[in-house]
Amino acid sequence: MKNINKVLISLLSLSTLAACSTDTPENDEAADTTESTEVTETVDMISNEEEKLSVVTTFYPVYEFTERVAGDRADVEMMISGGTDVHHYEPSARDIALINDADMFVFSSHEMETWVESMLASLDNEDIIIVEQAEAIDLMEPLADDHVDEEDDHGHEEDETDVHNLDPHVWLDPVLVQDQVETMKEAFIAVDPEGTDDYTQRAEEFQSELQELHEMYEAAFSEATQRRFVTQHEAFGYLARRYDLTQMAVGGISTEVEVSPSRIAEINHLVEDYDIPVIYYQEGANSSIAETVANETGTEVAELYSLEYLPGAIQDEGQGYIEAMTRNLEALQQSIQ
């Protein structure tokens, strides 16, 4: 919006010069009409582009939840591409410049993007709107009790090097995603009230899809008698809590913590005790730990999407969050029966 007046002046000047250069009187009216139409169309195009909100998001789920609500009223960009560790990301000079020029910056939570606070302190843009998508959600503690039931004899010692006090993976619960979509709707309406109807409609459409996804999960697991699943990375606590499942994770919340041989032996016992058929590893991660447990227990390995980025296979098919979570449901049904 900042340069629109300069653009208008330039275009009108060009129009005037073009009209003055016409030598044939009978062509003046037609030329003026043509030039006027072209100027109007060009100005309208530039005006529409300039009026769009500029929004920068951190990583994949934040981007999709934002983009689905924004529609064509905003240009939404994603800072962190696939394969990059979101927890330990270091914003580049380009990132800082991008955010300084934006109208809005959106992230998931301080627990997920631990670097956000220091980055925001370095910004020059005092007018930027900051949105924490998970702000309205009470983050839960890592599910230590879901690693091992109290009646089990196999104790689980917490690894003190796992620095996460709270679980940040709120985007893996479709119901909590509805809350995050609501947060985005309210943020967009606050900064762009003229788009209230558009933002509301898009938010409701997406929330309807999320509700259908939630009901699919409920129906799939409603009568299951084996409700435990083993993961290499403790990313699925919110999903487990929502659908009354038990996540037994080999490692903790952080993917940086090295898993001890004693923990692997402990999981081996649990897999055998509960007759667990599948060991899950996170997409894009090294699956060696899951494969070690599978080899030692005679089980299979399968992939679950933690969705810190959108897997290439899904992206190539033009699909997104709903489809990825549907595939997660199909994968989990190999263990939840």
Image: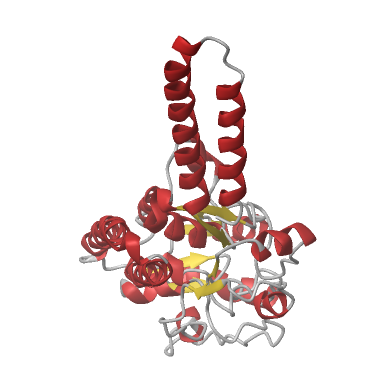
Number of numbered discs visible in the structure rendering = 0
- Whole-percent x, y for residue 42 in the image: 50, 34
Nearer to the camera, 265 or 246: 246
User: Compared with residue 108, is residue 53 higher up or lower down, i.e. above or below?
Assistant: above
- The residue at 44%/38% (across/down) is 318
Q: In this view, does 299 lie to the left or right of 2?
A: left
In the rendered image, the quadrant that contains the N terminus is bottom right
Q: Which of 10 and 294 is in front in this view?
A: 10
Q: In this view, does 93 lie to the left or right of 181?
A: right
Q: In which quarter of the image is the C terminus?
A: bottom left
Point 47% across, 39% down: residue: 45
From the viewer's perspective, tell me whether residue 52 is left or right of residue 198: right
Residue 117 percent location from the top left of the image? 66, 80
Q: Is residue 303 left or right of residue 101?
A: left
Residue 246 can be seen, yes or no: no
> What percent of the width, then of the height, locates residue 41?
44, 33
Q: Where is residue 227 in the image (x, y as percent from the top left)?
A: 34, 69
